[in-house]
């Protein structure tokens, strides 16, 4: 396999990924986003247009969120949030 064939395969794979993303993003932006985030249910057409490119690229993550049980976004867990939680017997 030469370099040109390798590049052609990569372009084909990227094209398929983006095509699947577009096919997923259309119904997701129209209906599915309200299942993932209830606040987004009130989003305007402009909001939906803004999130469309991101959904196209991140469609596997959005699919996992859509298939999940919870309708609420997960609580953010990072070092800052953990540090803000008061500890027992001490100061915050």
Image (cartoon, rainbow, N blue to C red):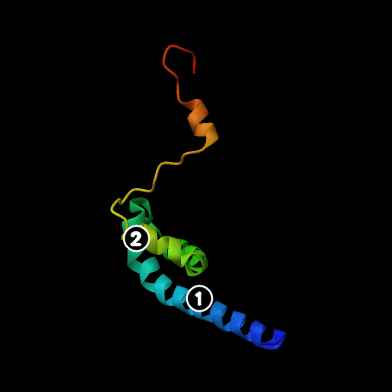
Residue depicted at x 45% and y 25%: 85
Q: What residue is drawn where x is 47% and y is 12%?
A: 90
Quick one: SS at disc 2?
Answer: helix
Asked if one can make out residue 78 in the rendered structure from this viewpoint, the answer is yes
**Residue 70 rendering spot, x and y as whole percentages:** 30, 50
Residue 49, numbered label: none
Query: Is 88 rendered above or below residue 8?
Result: above
Q: Which mark is residue 17?
A: 1
Do the numbered discs 1 and 2 sit on residues whose CB atoms are within 8 Å? no
Name the outermost residue toward the top: 89
Q: Earlier in the sequence, mark 1 or mark 2?
A: 1
Residue 84 in the image, given as x and y percentages of width and height: 49, 26
Residue 52 is situated, as x and y percent measured from the top left of the image, at 48, 67
Circle 2: is it few (<14), some (14-19), or many (20+) Cα within 10 Å? some
Q: Is residue 2 above or below residue 41?
A: below
Instruction: Give me the residue at 44% from left, 61% from top.
Output: 61
x, y percentage for residue 50?
50, 64
Please name whichever residue, 5 or 45, is drawn nearer the observer in this view of the structure: 5
Q: Which residue is mark 2?
A: 66
Position of residue 7 in the picture relative to residue 44 (left or right): right
Q: Is residue 22 above or below residue 85?
A: below
- 1 or 2: mark nearer the eye: 1
**Residue 50 falls left or right of residue 74:** right
Q: Residue furthest front?
A: 1
Q: Nearer the viewer, residue 5 or 48?
A: 5
Label 1 to label 2: alpha-carbon separation: 18 Å
64 over 88 or under it: above or below: below
State which quarter of the image contains the N terminus. bottom right
Residue density around tag 1, few if under 14, some if 14–19, many if 20 or more, within 10 Å: some
Q: Residue at x 45, y 41 (%)?
A: 76
């Amino acid at each position: 396999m030469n370099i040109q064939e390798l590049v052609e395969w990569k372009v084909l794979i990227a094209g398929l990924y983006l095509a699947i993303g577009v096919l997923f993003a259309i119904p997701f932006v129209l209906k599915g986003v309200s299942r993932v985030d209830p606040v987004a249910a009130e989003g305007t057409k402009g909001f939906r247009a803004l999130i469309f490119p991101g959904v196209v690229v991140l469609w596997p993550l959005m699919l996992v969120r859509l298939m999940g049980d919870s309708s609420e976004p997960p609580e953010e867990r990072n070092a800052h949030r953990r540090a803000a939680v008061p500890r027992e017997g001490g100061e915050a």
